[in-house]
Image (tube, coloured by chain):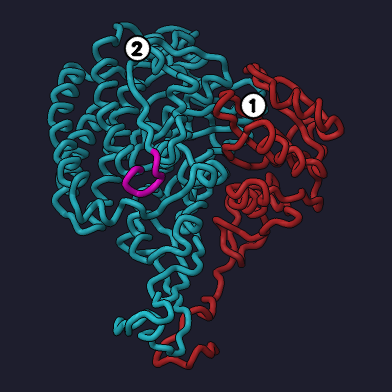
Chain colours: A cyan, B red
Amino acid sequence: MAAAGDEYDPTPSDDELEAHLQTRNMVVNLGPSHPATHGTVRLRIELDGENIVKMDTEVGFLHRGFQKSCENVTWTQVLPYTDRLDYVAALHNNFGYLTAVESLMGVDIPERAKYIRVIGAELHRISSHLTTAGALSLELGGFGAFLFAIEARELITDRITELTGARLTTSYGRIGGLNRDVPDGWNEKVLKTLLKVEELAGEVDTLLSRNRIFTDRTKGTGVITKEAALDFGFTGPCLRACGVNYDVRKANPYWVYDKLDFEVAIGHNGDNFDRYYMRVIEIRESIKMIRQAIAQMPQGPVMVDDWRIALPPKENVYNSIEGVISHFKLVMEGVPVPAGEVYSATESANGELGWYLKSDGSGRPYKVHVRAPGYQILAGLAHMCEGKMLADLIPTFDTINMIGGEVEQ
Amino acid sequence: MSTFALDQIQAQIPQALVERYVDRTGDAWGVVAREHIVAVAKLLKERLGFNLFISMDAVDRLHLEGPEQDPRFEVLYFLRNLERNELTRLKVRVNEGEDIPSIIKVFLGAEWGERFVWDFYGVAFAGGINKRILMYEEFVGHPLRKDYPLRGRQHLIPERPIKDIFRGPGTNGVQD
C-alpha cells in the first residue's frame, strides 16, 4: 500500500483490474451417473466462478431395502445381502455381521477360524485401499499408478476367489466359524502373492507420494478439522488422517488382533494427502499382519462343534436321526438366536462397521441396523467442499472412498 | 463394561434417565425421556468427552410381545468416547405422532441419522430437517415400519420439472 508522499507506483491493484460484470451463481449437477462418482450419488453444486458456494449431496439411487430384506429371512440368509454393502471389500461385511450375531448368541468360534478371518479381512483391506489410491491417481490424471494398483488388486481377488469361490460377492463364513477351510497350499500362495503385491503397492507409493503434480492437488485440499471430523462421525483412515488415534482393532480387539504386532497410522493435517497416505501405510501394516497370522495359524476345526449352529457332516445326515433332525431344523428354521440386542463393531476398510442387531427369538432378525462408515463420512462431504474450488471436489470425493452399496443400503 | 456415561447422566440430569438396563451380552443401555435428549447429548459431548458421533437408527416395536409394544418406536443413539474407550447406547421411546427434539445443533453428523429415521420410520424431529434421504420425496409411507408390506409397490412418478438448471444465453440473473 502506497503511503502519502511515496513515489508513483504503476502496478495496478486487483480492484482496478476487476471486470465489474453482472454474474450469477451457476448450478452444476455432478452425477448420479458420472465417471468420477464411482457409485451413484448426485452432487448439486452451486458455483460462483470456480468456487463452490453450496453443495447438496443426494443419495439413495442404489437403495435396495437392505434392512427390510434382512428382517424377512433367517439369520444365515442375511449373509449374501451383506456382500453388497461394501462390494469392494465384501469380507469385512460378512465377518462383521457374523461377529455381531456370534456375540449376541455368546458363541466363541475356533481359533483357526479367527486367524482365517483376519487373513481374509486384511487381504480385502489391501484390495480396498489399492482401489482408492488407484482411482484417486486416475482421476488426477495418473493412469500408470492406477494400473499398478489394479494389477495388485487382481492378484488379491484371485486369492479371494480360491478361498471363497467368488470374486466379489464372497458370502464366506457362517455363524459359528467358516463354511470351509482354506484350500491346500493356499497359505504359501498368499505369501508369494504378498511379495508381488508389496512390490506393486511400492510402485504406486513411489509414483504418487512424492509426485509434484499429485501432491499439489492433494496437500491442503479437502481439509477437515479433528473436531468437525468427530462431529460428523468420521472413522477409519479419514479420522486417523486428522490425528485421532482410533482403530477398532486396537481399541477393542476382536478375533486375534491382540496377538498381532502392528502399528496404527496417524496423520495430522486431515487433508486429501494424509487420507491417501494413511492407506499407503495401512497396506504395509496389513501385509505384515497377514504374514504373522499365517505363521501363527494353528491347525484344527474352523466351525463350532454344535449341531444347533453348524450343519452336521453329510454322513451323519444320511445315517443318523440326530443328524437329519439338526439338518432339517437348521435349514427350515435357521440358527436359533436368543431374544436380545447387541451393538458390535469391527474395523472395515473405511472405518468402524457397526451392527445393531435385535432378535425376538423367532429365528429371523427383528432389526438389522448397519452403521456404514461411508454414510457418516459422506454426510461431511459438503462441509469439506463448501467455499473451496470445484477441482478439489474430485480428490476429496476419492479419498473419502464413498461406496454406494454401504451408504445407500 | 463401563457405565460411566449413564452414571453421570443419572447424577447430573436425574429426571432425564427413565430406565437403564443391561443386555444379555453385558452392555449397559439407557432410556432417555424425549424432552431431555438435547441436554443429555450436550452433557455427553461437552462435559463427558463423548464427542464421536457413531450412528442413529430406530426400531418399530409393533410386532414385539405385550408391554414392549408401547411406545411404538425406539430411536437409538450411539456416541463414543475415545479417551475412555466407551460407547454410550441411548434410546428414546416415542409413540406415533410424537416428535423428538433434534440434536443436529450438538452433533453435525446427526442430520443424516435423523433424516434416515424420518425417512424409514416417520419419527419427526422438532427443529431438525425432516426430509427423506434414501427414498424419493414422492414415496408414500415409511418402508421400515413393520406394517409396511415387504413387496409394497408404488406407482411410477412423473418426471420432476427441472428448476435449478437454466440453458442458453444469460438472463442477467433472472431465473424463470
**Camera-nearest residue between A185 and A332:** A185
Q: Are marks 2 and 1 on the same chain?
A: yes
**Contact check, label 2 and label 1, Cβ < 8 Å:** no
List the single residue furthest toward the right: B15
Q: Secondary structure at mark 2?
A: helix
Q: In this rendering, does residue A328 appear at all?
A: yes
* Disc 1: host chain: A
**Position of A286 relative to A295 (above/below):** below
**Camera-nearest residue between B69 and A225:** A225
> Which three-letter amino acid code belongs to the residue tagged 2?
Arg
Quadrant of the rendered structure where residue B11 is?
Answer: top right
Q: Estimate how packed mark 1 is, as few (under 14), some (14 to 19) or many (20 or more) residues with alpha carbons within 10 Å.
A: many
Disc 2 marks which residue?
A112
Image quarter (top left, top right, bottom left or bottom right) of the N terminus of chain B: top right
Segment colored magenta: A268-274
Quadrant of the rendered structure where residue B77 is?
Answer: top right
Q: Secondary structure at mark 1?
A: strand
> Which three-letter amino acid code belongs to the residue tagged 1?
Glu
Residue shown at the point (34%, 37%) measured from the top left: A89
Residue shown at the point (50%, 52%) measured from the top left: A380
Left or right placement of residue A361 versus residue A393 in this view: right
* Disc 2: host chain: A
Q: CA distance from mark 2 to mark 1?
A: 27 Å
Residue shown at the point (31%, 51%) measured from the top left: A219
Residue A103 image offset from top left, x and y in percent: 54, 20
Left or right placement of residue A352 versus residue A349 in this view: right
Mark number, residue A341: 1
Residue B170 image offset from top left, x and y in percent: 43, 91
**Position of A169 relative to A222 (above/below):** above
Left or right placement of residue B54 versus residue A27 in this view: right
